[in-house]
Amino acid sequence: MRDLILTLFFICALPWCFMRPYFGVLIWSWFGYMNPHRLAWGFAYHFPFVQITALTTLAGMVFSREPKRMPINGVTVVWLTWVAWMSLTTLFALNPDEAAPEWQRMIKIQIMILVTLLVMYGRERIERLVWCIALSIGFFGIKGGIFTLLTGGQFRVWGPEGSFIEGNNEIALALLIIVPLMRYLQVVQTRRWVRIGLGVSMVLCVFSIVGSYSRGAFLGGAAMLVALWLRSRRKIVMAIPLVFVALAALTFMPEKWAARMESIEGYSADGSAMGRINAWWFAYHVAEDHPFVGGGFDSFSPELFMRYAPNPTDFHDAHSIYFEVLGEHGFVGLALYLTLAVLVMLMGARIIRQVRGRGELKWAADLAAMLQVSFIGFAVSGAFLGLAYFDLPYHIMALMVLLHEHVKEARASSPVTDPAALAGRQSLLGRT
């Protein structure tokens, strides 16, 4: 029955994806993040919903009369260069047969994220995308949080099977990213019941993150909580619920969870941690041997470990977005990747600075701040997870770019109206 309902909905949605490509981006994001077909157990389980949605949306882009504009700024220039560089390194891949499918997977994701930049302009569409992403992944956070509470945290929380976020570490990272998005949606909501629902959802997501037993998510969550507090306008008021929820989640978990978190400090005695370090040295040695292009996609293989790893028999995946990029795309690729991250954070700071004194754009400052918090969570937790090509952080970047373009157009079309901001600007001009 689930298969039939989902397929019927999909068939009805396809014409809208063609006529309104922005709607296609939302449907693509929903299928990509929530994977509703993985919750069915019949023919829909392996049906290519995502691919068909992408093709229909791209076809609609050709015939749609809606304006399509690619924002050109430092972020998008480096972004496109990064995508081109990944394509170039694939030509020199050390495992060409395995690299080709990974490149195809990457380029499909990047094309649809870039389509997002073309059609998801304006506050309404931006917020619809935020809702779509937050609820799609938040579904598993709510489900996992309830599971953690009911089982006393004795078992790990896992993500949807056959997806980027199937593993416990991966679902924890995704939930870290979307919690700040939920916070933004809560801040701008006027309906009390929606605000309460989002608050409960965030709490359950926190329990789900803790219940994943992910040490990387633990570190990323700590960094993100600090960033969330720093980005809050009422820091004292915000600190109380943050500390309460964090302490409640930590004290709720059993002793085996605490023992796993304590193993972060004693990493030298942890076989898993030492295996990751072995993989990181492998990545460095590959990049040292191929400094410009690295080893290409899927370089982390048992065969190449025999040549480059300090311990050739201890094979591990990258377990770090930074070493994954370094090993597969060289020092140039890592420089592009880090530059892109820095530019996104600086763009967020610029948005917040530019909307001061503009009450109608206060929402943009709130969203930019929460996108920064999401990105910090990804940057810290990603140091221990090999998810450099995961589409969610790229969607966060796309949202930041779209927000920047919206603010730029709004500032160009209307002058500053806040008397305090005008007075501050005039005094500044007087001093210069």
Image (cartoon, rainbow, N blue to C red):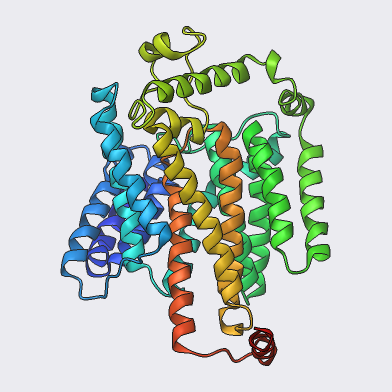
Question: Residue 303: percent from the left, percent from the top?
Answer: 36, 11
- Observer able to see residue 345: yes
Q: Quadrant of residue 269?
A: top right
Q: Looking at the image, which residue sits at the far left?
A: 63
Q: Is residue 28 left or right of residue 169?
A: left
- Observer able to see residue 158: no
Q: Is residue 300 above or below residue 25?
A: above
Looking at the rendered image, the quarter that the C terminus falls into is: bottom right
Q: Is residue 158 above or below residue 310?
A: below
Q: Residue at x 63, y 38 (%)?
A: 217
Q: Is residue 194 left or right of residue 46?
A: right
Q: Quadrant of residue 107?
A: top left
Front residue (pair 271, 418): 418
Q: Quadrant of residue 121?
A: bottom left
Front residue (pair 22, 263): 263
Question: Residue 11: percent from the left, percent from the top?
Answer: 25, 57
Counting every numbered tag in the picture gives 0
Front residue (pair 38, 409): 409
Question: Residue 76: percent from the left, percent from the top?
Answer: 38, 58
Question: Residue 425: percent from the left, percent from the top?
Answer: 64, 86
Q: Residue at x 43, y 67 (%)?
A: 402
